[in-house]
Amino acid sequence: MCAICGCGGGDHAHSHGLSDRSHALASPPYASSDHSHAPSIEFGAGLAAVHIPGWSPQRTIRIERAILSKNDALAEINRLRLRAADVFALNFVSSPGSGKTSLLVRTITDVLSRRPIAVIEGDQQTSLDADRIRRAGAPAVQLNTGNGCHLDAHMVAQSLDELSPIPGSLLFIENVGNLVCPAAFDLGEAHKVVVLSVTEGEDKPLKYPNMFAAADLMLLNKTDLLPHVEFDMQACVEAARRVNPAIDILPVSARTGAGLSAFYDWIEARRLSYATAPPGIEPLNRRISR
């Protein structure tokens, strides 16, 4: 089983390029049939550099680097390819049910008349989300990962071959719903955008710090439900900025459209900045997170 994402065996589409022996090294050293004591077992600092004293992460980190180095090389090829085609890619990440697909459908409806949009949809099974995107008017490729819990750079490269985005377009990558593994896998995108629903609780940035450390923008979605849920907006903002002081935060509602004009302005401003940046210059958050 993989130390990074828990995938392995079966028909899982991506390859980490490690031998079975390397995967075996990632097996927990504390496995035991004695469950009379159940302490919290910590593996130390992750991408967000949040460290709680506990088990040494040395062995896990060694395997993680071998896994990610191959993916990062492919991601850089994707990034150069997208730059050359003048395609601005955003990687949307979140837990399941945050409203990513609804947000993309609303964005396509509002923006498509001004700028071409193509979408890569990631799910473990079905083409339901890609079907919704196509009905909204944008071309979409569905990536079903089977047992996999995230997209990787190789999958995105194959999707680009299929989509062939129009120069000057936006490429939206909707990752598999998961607040853990997608944080570690660069796809060649310009920015990660983490979507957090107000129904999920304001503590998510502290519980899943790697994801919020890797993102450049947090969209607080479903704000139309705020009168009906217990959600402390200020506490959530403070939690996100504790993990990532540079993160931009926008409250939005895919249902009502509230706040989306600010999101569209954010996209356009970052697109212009990305297009004029020298090749090889990555967004600050991605460089910090490695």
Image (tube, rainbow, N blue to C red):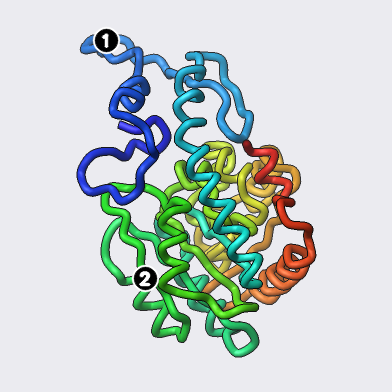
Based on the displayed image, in which of its 4 quarters is residue 83 positioned? bottom right
Residue 94 lies left or right of residue 9; in this view the side is right
> Do we see residue 8 in this rendering?
yes
Dot 2 lies on which element? Answer: helix
**Circle 2 is placed at which residue position?**
129
In this view, 30 is above or below 158: above
What quarter of the picture does the N terminus occupy?
A: top left
- Whether residue 134 is situated above or below residue 49 in the rendered picture: below
Measured in 3D between alpha carbons, the distance from the residue under mark 2 to the one under mark 1, in whole angstroms, is 44 Å
Task: Give residue 79's position: percent from left, percent from top.
Answer: 60, 58
Please state the horizontal and vertical placement of residue 204, each as a whole percent of the image.
Answer: 54, 44
User: Do the residues bearing badges 2 and 1 touch, measured as CB atoms within 8 Å?
Assistant: no
Percent coordinates x, y for residue 249 in the rendering: 69, 57
* Amino acid at dot 1: Ser
Give the structural element (helix, strand or loop) at label 1: loop
The image shows residue 125, relative to residue 139, as above or below, that is above
Mark 1 closeness class: few <14, some 14–19, many ≥20 residues within 10 Å: few
Residue labelled with disc 1: 36
